Every structure is written in structure tokens, then in C-alpha cells.
Amino acid sequence: MTESRHQAAVVEFDHVTKHYDVPTGKAAGKPTPGAVNDLSLVVPAGKICCLVGPSGCGKTTSLKMVNRLIEPTSGRILIDGTDAGARELTDLRRSIGYVIQQVGLFPHQTIGENVVTVPRLLGWPKARQRERSEELLGLVGLDPAKYRDRFPAQLSGGERQRVGVARALAADPPIMLMDEPFGAVDPIVRDRLQNEFLRLQETLAKTILFVTHDIDEAIKMGNLVAVFQTGGVLAQFGPPLEILAAPASEFVARFVGQDRGLKRLSLLRVSDVVLLRPTIVRPGEPAAQAKARAKDDPQGYVLLVDQADRPLGWIAHRDIPDFGELVEAMANPVSPTVNRRTTLKDALSMMLDADVQTGIVVDRNGAVQGLLTVEAVAQKMREGEHAPTYDQAAADGTEDAAATPGEADLAAAAAGTPPPAS
Amino acid sequence: MDISVDWNWVFNHFGAMWTRFLQHLQLVVIAVVAGFVIALILAVWSYRRPTVYGPITAVTGLLYTIPSLAAFALLRPITGLTLLTALIPLTTYTLLILVRSNVAGFQSVPAEVLEAAEGMGYTRRQRLLRVELPLAVPLIMSGIRLATVTTIGLATVASILGETFGGFGFFITEGLNQFFLTEVYVGAILSIIFAFAADALLVRIERLITPWARARAETA
């Protein structure tokens, strides 16, 4: 992107409340859908904050109060410390990217025109608009030559949503508001759009408020997750790992679901685990020497690698001959290899599929970095659970009792994870 | 009465037909354009304040029921035998159709498009002129087509106001007065051709200004 970067902005909700008139009759007394009750939270610059919760919990209302499509009843929303309520309305909105589920492209304008809606409102010169339009279409993976002159009706749902994202980015706003942006496309397209968007965000580093009703999407997309519950109450706010590890209430625990241990694994990567060091041997090494070295190795196996440190196979201690040299034929085929970017969930599933307890971690060139064991993965899963889950706290009648290892094992088992290898 | 066509008369009156066509065109164009402007204002008003829509349709509906002959007779003492006397009822009659089609046009704009426009910082005026109005065009144009064809028919009645009004209607009135059917045929047929041609022209214009609507139809 050739545009000069705007600094991402801090968005702060300061005791924000939105009341709707209490309906009379049957619904009287119940919380009004969309109401927000004394919301205070800070989204740091450059982070994605997912607002998640059941329908009517006030997450969309909260989002729309940022660009003042809805005005709060009380409280303030501060953007980099400035009260959004004090800013000129159209000026405020043009400085905030806005993406909605139904996209809302202008049917009478071409894709190229749609994308530069805000630059046009801001009065950019025509040539610069055109240039920006091409750049943005490229950015979201749509060939400008092919799409520029089409109308929205000629695009698929996924393509339209890409255009919607491009349009929101057009004037390089420091903040983006996204209201279920990928909610209307099928799961496969949604997954692709999510991944592409996360990749985009790595370079864009916008401050993003992202509304979704899908906890899995919130965990995947958010640096921070704000769980709302009915009545517009913020039930918990924190990084996704924290929400999964220590739900603040029964509501959050239920909303996050029974499989939150597994969900945590999808957020952790191999690089988050301390790897074991295998005993490395090479073809041609005197067998007696290898046997001596293997004596201290707890694994029961040594790892045979080639000149470039690429794994060739395992040799069990008892299979190492007393004399002669090590040769490749002695080795059993290697267990699955993973790299440091592999999620623990994927790594675990590869190990379970291969029916082994140990995976070999390799770098980009295939050279051995260390070993990942099923036990280490299970250990990592337990680590997050040092605070008791709500259910345990309720059962114990204690708020802050540290979970004993036994309890953690139970929790892991309850979360549907296989117990560590014995 | 002789019901056969006097072709001699037809061939000798091409000049008169052209003059009458221009008269007819003038009546229709002014009535539809004036009606459209008034209807657009009323439509925007009732789109923004839905409570006025009911009364507006009631009044335009009532005006539509006034027989044209009665309207000419009532207006004559006030505005005399002028073009205005012919135009006032013709314009009024377009309102019922045009207000409804304009309002329907605005209502056809998808809610998410309006939300996106508002969220991106369109002012209300920009939104009306650059989003709502262009998107309302297909329904607005269907109203204009209907109003135009209706007005072409109604305008023939204005010929009772005198020979300088009424366009093709003059042939019909004169033919009836003189028991000369050829002239009635000519007036009627030319009116019909005019109506068809005007409608076809408006369809072309609509297609020209709404290329996006065709893109939608092709993919739908």
C-alpha cells in the first residue's frame, strides 16, 4: 500500500449505557433487546476486539454507538481520548471503516466506484480515487481488470464481502467496525475470508471491533474477546485464551462450550511448548558410542538424522547393536513432523492419527528442532486451568482454590481430550 | 354517415398533423414534467414523514376522480381559454400515479444499502441524491410511463377548450362535429401511435440510465 499509514486508534467505552423505552404489556420487565448496561472497556490500538454473545445482548448496539448510528443514553466513547459524541457526525463516520453482514454495496455503482465511496465523499481527485480503487481490489484478492466495471449483482456473496472490506479500508481509517462481516457466506468461504482478513490485519494493524454470535469465530479472530450476556451486560473481557481457561461465570462457561480445552489448543502453537531434546545419532556413528549416549536418554529411542539434520528414523535402545556402525536400515520410520507454527490442536491430531506419543518438530528446511509429546500438549492444556473453572468453584464452594493436578486431569478429560500417555 | 376513409383528406393534412402533434407533445411534456416535480416533492416528504402519505394519496386520489370536462368548465372562469386551463387538470391527474410510484421507488431501496451509506458518512442530502434517487429510478420510471400514456389519452379532451389546444384531440372533436369519420380515425390512431412511441422511448431512456438493473436481471 502506498498510502501513508494512519495511526490505529484506541477505542474506549466509558460507562456507556443505552436504554430503550421499556415495552409495556407482556415484555414489560424483561431486558429490552439491544440495550447496553454500563459498558466500560478499552480496545488498544491495532487490536481486534470481538464482541460476542447471544442475539439481543447489545453487541451490535455497542458497535453502532462508536460511529453514532446509535447515540448512547449515557456515558462516552473515546477515540484516542477524544469524545466521539463531540465530533462532527459525517466527519467521524468517514474516519471509521464500516462493514455489515449484508454488505450493502450500492447496486447502481460499479465495484470500482463502490470501493472508493468514502474517498469520493472526502473529495479526492478522480485519478487518485481510481488508483486507490485498483489497489484495494488487489488487496482483497480481486483482479481489478476483471471486477472493476462489474455491478454488485454480478458477484458472488464471498466476492461482495471482499468488496465490502475493501470499501471500508478505502480512506485508510484507523478504526474498523465489522458487524458479523462473514455471517452470510457458507462455512468454507467464511474460513477463507477469516484467514485472509487476519493476514491483511497483520500489515494493516487497524483497531477493529468485530461483532459475531459465533464463539469460535470470536476466539479465532480476536486479540481480545468481550462476552456479552442478555441485558447488555459485559460478562467477561480478555484475551481468548483467558476466556477459555477461566470463564468468569456460569454464563460464560456455557457460552464458550464444553470443548473449551480443545479450543485452547487451536490457539496455541508448537512454539508455545518447551520442546524435548532428542538424542541425535548419525549414520556411520560407532554403535557402542551411540549406545553409551542413549543410556541417559529418557525416551528409550535415539533419533537418526542425515547430514542436514533431517530426521531419518527412530532406533530403540535395545535395537542398537553392541559393535559396528549405525546404518539407516536400523531405523523405524519417523513419527509425524510438525513445525513451530502448527497449532497444538493440529499437532495433537496428527500424533493421534499416527498412533504415536511423540512428534518431531522441524524447521523450514526439515532440520530437527526438538520433540513434541502428547504429554507436553496435555500439560499445556492444563496450564491455563490454574484458576478453577466456574463449575469446579461452584462444586468446591471456593472462589480461588488452585486446582490440584488431579482436578486438572479431570477437567481435561471432561473437555474431551485424551489423557496423557502413561 | 360515411364510414370509409377519405385518403385524399389524409394526404392533404400531413402539415396539420405535425402542428397538432407539437401541440399534443407540449401538453403532455409540461403536464408530466410538472406533475413529476410536484410528486417528487410530495414523495420525499411522505417518505420522511410517513404520516403524511395517507392524506397525500387521499387528496391526489380525490383529484383524480374529478371528470376532466368538469375541471375544464370549472377552471374556465378563472384561467380562461388558456393553455393553463388545459394543463392544470392534466398535471393533477398524473399526481396519483407519480406520488405512489415515487414513494414505492424510495421504499425499494434496500435497508442495508441505507445503513451502509449512513455509516460511511453520507449526509442526508447526499444519500437522497446519490443513493436513494438513483435506486428508485426503475419504479419511478414505471410511474412516468404510465402517467405519460394516460396523459396522452386525456390530453385529447382538452380540444374542447378551442382549436389551439388538444393536439390530436382536435381532429376527433372536429370530425365528430362535422360527421367526418376520417378525421376521427386520424386523431385516434395518431394518439395511439404517440402513446406507444412515447412508452417505447421511455423504456429506452430507463435502460440507458439504469445499466445496473439489467446486470441484476441477467444474473437473477
Image (cartoon, coloured by chain):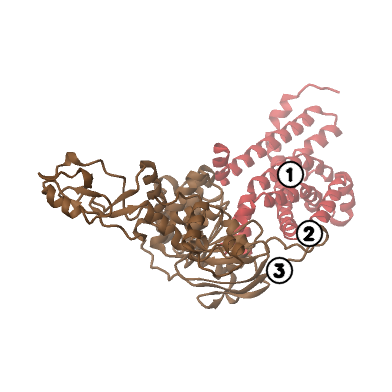
Chain colours: A brown, B red
Number of numbered discs present?
3
- For the residues labelled 2 and 1, the Cα–Cα distance comes to 47 Å
- Both on one chain, marks 1 and 3? no
Q: Determine whether the residue tagged by mark 1 lies in a helix, strand or loop.
A: helix
**Tag in front: 3 or 2:** 2
Q: Position of residue A313 (x, y in %)?
A: 23, 44
The residue at which mark 1 appears reads as B147
Residue nearest the viewer, comparing B42 with A105: A105
- Both on one chain, marks 2 and 1? no
The residue at which mark 2 appears reads as A27
Q: Amino acid at mark 2?
A: Ala
Kindly identify the residue that appears in the image at 17 percent across and 47 percent down: A306
The residue at which mark 3 appears reads as A19
The answer to whether residue A217 is visible is: yes
Q: Chain of mark 3?
A: A
Residue nearest the viewer, comparing B54 with A219: A219
Q: Earlier in the sequence, mark 3 or mark 2?
A: 3
- Both on one chain, marks 3 and 2? yes
